[in-house]
Image (cartoon, coloured by chain):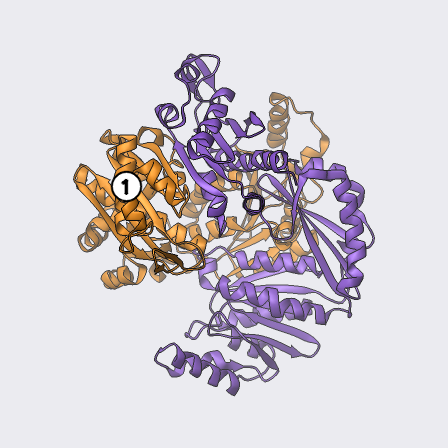
Chain colours: A purple, B orange
Amino acid sequence: MSLLQNPVMRAEIVSVGTELLLGQTVDTNATKLGEVFAEFGLIHTHRQTVGDNAVRLTEALRLALSRSDLVVTIGGLGPTEDDLTRDGIAEALAESLVIDEDVASHLKNLFKSRNIPWTESQLRQAQRPPCAAPIPNPNGSAPGLICRKDGKVVVALPGPPNEFNPMVDGPLRSLLQEMGDGMIISSRFLRVVGIGEAALEAKIFDLLSLPDVTVAPYAKVGEVHLRLTTRAESEAAAESPLRQVEDQIRERLGDAIYATGNLTLPGWIVQELSRHKATVSVAESCTGGLLGAQLSSIDGSSAAFSGGIIAYLPTVKEDKLGVSRHTIECPDHGSVSARCAEEMAGGVRHSFGTTIGVSITGVAGAQPIVENGVEKPSGLVFIGVAGPTGTGSHRHFFPGNRETIRKRSVQMALVSLRMKILEVLGS
Amino acid sequence: MSLLQNPVMRAEIVSVGTELLLGQTVDTNATKLGEVFAEFGLIHTHRQTVGDNAVRLTEALRLALSRSDLVVTIGGLGPTEDDLTRDGIAEALAESLVIDEDVASHLKNLFKSRNIPWTESQLRQAQRPPCAAPIPNPNGSAPGLICRKDGKVVVALPGPPNEFNPMVDGPLRSLLQEMGDGMIISSRFLRVVGIGEAALEAKIFDLLSLPDVTVAPYAKVGEVHLRLTTRAESEAAAESPLRQVEDQIRERLGDAIYATGNLTLPGWIVQELSRHKATVSVAESCTGGLLGAQLSSIDGSSAAFSGGIIAYLPTVKEDKLGVSRHTIECPDHGSVSARCAEEMAGGVRHSFGTTIGVSITGVAGAQPIVENGVEKPSGLVFIGVAGPTGTGSHRHFFPGNRETIRKRSVQMALVSLRMKILEVLGS
């Protein structure tokens, strides 16, 4: 992404909070911010984490300011004695804190409207260095801060993710646009399934080093996301170069791209099924409900997802899904087999009266199982899909521990379900 | 935890990897290491994160060494040109890298035994500063390093969690013991459910500042974990003070403590049911399989967990669980009601022939639902439990988004299931 870098913009994160050092909290905020910095092509070479201590915070900020143009702090903006980020920033910028009267009266009104008793300590949240402008916080009480001094910018963001994330996506992104050279940064995500990261990179290798559009792959569980980014004078001007590269990628990857933007694979499935007034049910063995949990994680999924059977025991596969005794007991098949997966998918589809039925059966335990005299290794998983165009199954082998095997099983079941939806309903 | 601190031991983490700064990887390793530092009572006030760059890594190490006795690096130990941690450490310690012949021949044998062609670049992993001793890595190729110079210790650990975690729990813990004053650090975890963190702290407030045993609460979703730690001359000598505090806590919290050590709540449930040859089945509406996924996440859970019904639609509640039409359609009840939860729990218990049946029904969507003319708000959840001693339900209200509501629903269903197990099977 070298060509996106604005050579004058170096950015650094200072994460603040003793809980981060004690290992009580994982710093996912810094990860998110790093992704945004990368998207804007900023040079981002260091991150510091310090506890709730004003002296150490001031030192960290001075070090950051000595090598970066933009310093963003995360956390330490609350009303308690431990919330020292405002103090640290003021000290590092050689300023004294003042009360922002607008913020103070906003806070008092907020407390009144929520019927929470006002205490003077809340006023800490209205403090700012004179060089700072507050960033409104619609999701909490403490505002963020944008401090500009001597050509440097210090931004203070709150730590709770429900306050942090909107402030990054709104005001911070606007600031990064404004701090740039007048050009805007425009991005889009292509979401790819059914092809590994290495194979994908091989297919689009030449597109990973284009002069005007950066293409960055992010590997996820069973998916790869491609971020296309360009700099342009306007969103309209960015459209053409992004579209051109997207078209080239689509030509090479075809159906493997299931969505652009924020639509997840379960989201795509629920959207497509709902749009066609079609439904799905699930029959799960080794995943024990994880596939249903994924589908039902989407708000509004009840239009497309009817439910299913968790058939953790072979007897449940027979009783509730109509898997035949022969399939369960035959050495050629068994409860972990292609035929069992197909009978499970067909059984749940029939029982729930849905357009499509999906099933998962496999060995997720650390040890292989032996059924009907045949050993089935850990990681062997069959995924069945039944629909109006017929019933089929895929055999998979997932190395890894129980959690990995189950997650990949669910992901591949979603991929198989997607292929069936394309086959049955069209795209 | 101030009394555990050994005043001469200051520790600092330097996380290495451009992927951490780009936001492609969350630094969970540093979180884990922070927890271990806290457990050993080390003074831990800074963390640095740098990319794969030898100059910046060396600078970060020099800064860390200027203020800490122990510096632990994470990542950058692989065989590629980007793996520069060994180079950075050598430079910061003013040493030159040498090849460790034992490690080199171990690597060659490893590659031979795995039938992987040997390339000379792999030899980078055998390099070390002369002051360093390698830490064997049974889960990967690159060894860790313990470097001792001028009274300072630098430890280099690999980044992949499956290599990092065992190296922390084994060799690093041993080193921390050894670097101490001859005293050992002994800890135990008490796992608490069914009582919030604030209420719990109020009950054991006086025990949070004892002179010899530190008690640190860690809030998890629907649980609190208490870590009891003491310093003693031996594990045997630690037993008595830890036991004394544990007894006091048990006296105050009683049944709320469900386990000590690493046993999770689903793990406890599977263990207790298996021990009594009892079984459970689930009927899930708004959680869509998440409860079954939790129970089946335990290796060996098939002895205790038979499966269940994902009854995402009201018709499925009737057809598969025998919930009465009256319950679904009556304004006093509906599909989100105590009676529906109880009928679901009883229905799945009957249908699957298990000792206990557990159900969840509620509103996880962002919008309230209206059924039979009655509005049910987002976050309203009923959990039903049916067993040989009878059937009951609990009404909950969980504020938050869809994910939070579903997670807390599952956690409270596990808590209710635990209470039923205690009631039916005894403790």
Looking at this view, is A346 or B301 the one in front? A346
The answer to whether any part of residue B350 appears in the image is yes
Residue B212: give x, y in percent of width and height.
27, 57
Is A122 placed left or right of B51 in the picture? left
Residue B332: give x, y in percent of width and height.
26, 55
Q: Which of the 4 quarters of the picture holds residue B143? A: top right
Q: Residue furthest right?
A: A211
Taking A105 as reference, is A144 above or below it?
above
- Could you tell me the amino acid type at mark 1? Ala
The answer to whether any part of residue B234 appears in the image is no
Residue B334: give x, y in percent of width and height.
31, 51
Mark 1, residues whose alpha carbon is within 10 Å: few (<14), some, or many (≥20)? Answer: many
Question: What residue is rendered at 81% in x and 55% in y?
Answer: A212
Location of the C terminus of chain A (image quadrant): top right
Q: Chain of mark 1?
A: B
Q: Secondary structure at mark 1?
A: helix
Taking A168 as reference, is B219 above or below it?
above
Residue A155: give x, y in percent of width and height.
60, 71
Q: Which residue is mark 1?
A: B345
Looking at this view, is B20 or B128 the one in front? B20
Is A197 placed left or right of B241 in the picture? right
